[in-house]
Image (cartoon, grey):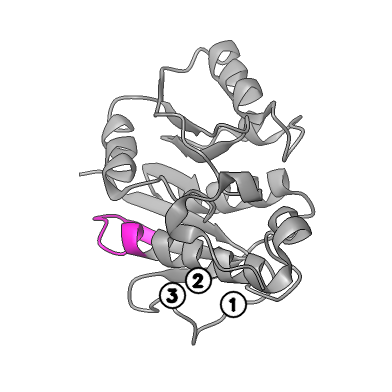
Amino acid sequence: MQKRLLIIFYRNPELGKVKTRLAATLGDGNALAVYLKLVNHTQSITKDLAVDKMVCYSHHVDTEDSWCNKVYHKEIQKGATLGEKLEHAVKQAFEKDYQSVGVIGSDCFELTEEILNQSFQKLESKDAVIGPAKDGGYYLLGMRRFIPDLFKNKEWSTSNVAKDTINDFKQLKLDYFELPTLRDVDREEDLPEELRVKLR
């Protein structure tokens, strides 16, 4: 079996610094509450996956938080832009001899353990896997080797990211698989009923 790693990009949960687009309409407290529910969901669908798991923290590594130290390796994000941070984390993983690497965030309440397993199964034969989000970004990116082009020349946090990444796949002649399109939770209208919190 391949040596596999799931990287989870994670923003330290600080009031006023997470889910700012949600906070614009719901307030900082509700935005933080929603974020923590999203994090809890991400933990529930990843903890039992039969792959290695690493959490990449935005500001500081917390060894006493809800991410179990026995289940998740912990690192700090390195780089100025999201592209640089993703590139560094993925490059480091392949330097540690992983044969397939997937990256997710903690924004997608529709993401399931089954989809994560499917992405790693596809990477046994495909060069790359992408999970497009309805807002034009992606909730998952996976690959079997380090491909730095996937992290360069992107307008991060825009509606072009998934499309531009798929164009990279085609230009590089990669054999890729596209997962179902799912919804990220960024704005109030994205909230599924289970995540709705009572407005203060």
Find out whether residue 40 is within the magenta segment: no
Q: How many marks?
A: 3
* Marks 2,3: beta carbons within 8 A: yes
Q: Say which of 108 and 83 sits in front.
A: 108
Labels 2 & 1 near each other (Cβ < 8 A): yes
Q: Residues within 10 Å of mark 3 (few under 14, many from 20)?
A: some
Q: Amino acid at mark 2?
A: Lys
The quarter in which the C terminus is drawn is bottom right
Q: Would you say residue 186 is visible in this rendering?
A: no
Which disc, if any, is residue 74?
A: 2
Q: Tell me the residue that label 3 is attached to.
A: 67
On the image, numbered disc 1 is attached to which residue?
61
Q: CA distance from mark 2 to mark 1?
A: 7 Å
183 vs 152, left or right, is left
* CA–CA distance in space, label 3 to label 1: 11 Å
What residue lies at 28% left-to-right and 37% top-to-bottom? 118
Q: Earlier in the sequence, mark 3 or mark 1?
A: 1
